[in-house]
Image (spheres, helix red, strand yellow):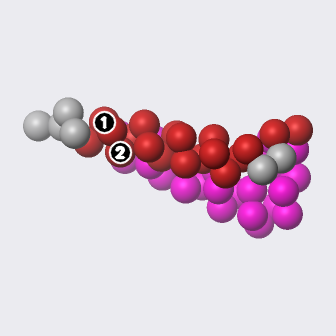
């Protein structure tokens, strides 16, 4: 759960730091959506945490 949230954050940070060349240059602006999607999966996992 926390791993996915951190991975999503790292994905977005990597996208900005690399000036849109990493992690997937072909995805372009969709890298933001991918990063937030990964983080949201982690967030949704917190609702099932007990």
Residue 40 vs residue 15: left or right? left
In this rendering, the answer to whether 36 lies above or below 1 is below
Image quadrant in which you'd find residue 15:
bottom right
The residue at 26%/42% (across/down) is 46
Residue 24 vs residue 37: left or right? right
The residue at 39%/41% (across/down) is 42
Which residue was labeled with disc 1?
45
Magenta region, residue range: 1-25
Percent position of residue 17, x then y: 77, 66
The circle on residue 43 is 2
In this rendering, the answer to whether 34 lies above or below 17 is above
20 within the magenta span: yes
The residue at 67%/51% (across/down) is 32
Residue 33 vs residue 22: left or right? left
Quadrant including the N terminus: top left
Percent position of residue 30, x then y: 73, 44
Percent position of residue 38, x then y: 52, 40
Q: Residues within 10 Å of mark 1 (few under 14, many from 20)?
A: some
The answer to whether residue 2 is visible is yes
In this rendering, the answer to whether 50 lies above or below 6 is above
Q: Residues within 10 Å of mark 2 (few under 14, many from 20)?
A: some
The residue at 78%/50% (across/down) is 29
Q: Main secondary structure of the magenta part?
A: helix
Element class at badge 1: helix
Quadrant including the C terminus: top left
The circle on residue 13 is none
Image quadrant in which you'd find residue 26:
top right
Element class at badge 2: helix
Q: CA distance from mark 1 to mark 2?
A: 5 Å
The answer to whether residue 3 is visible is no
Q: Are marks 1 and 2 in contact (CB under 8 Å)?
A: yes
């Amino acid at each position: 759960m926390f791993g996915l949230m951190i991975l999503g954050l790292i994905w977005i940070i990597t996208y900005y730091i690399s000036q849109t060349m990493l992690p997937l240059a072909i995805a372009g602006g969709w890298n933001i959506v991918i990063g937030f999607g990964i983080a949201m999966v982690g967030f949704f996992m917190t609702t099932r945490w007990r």
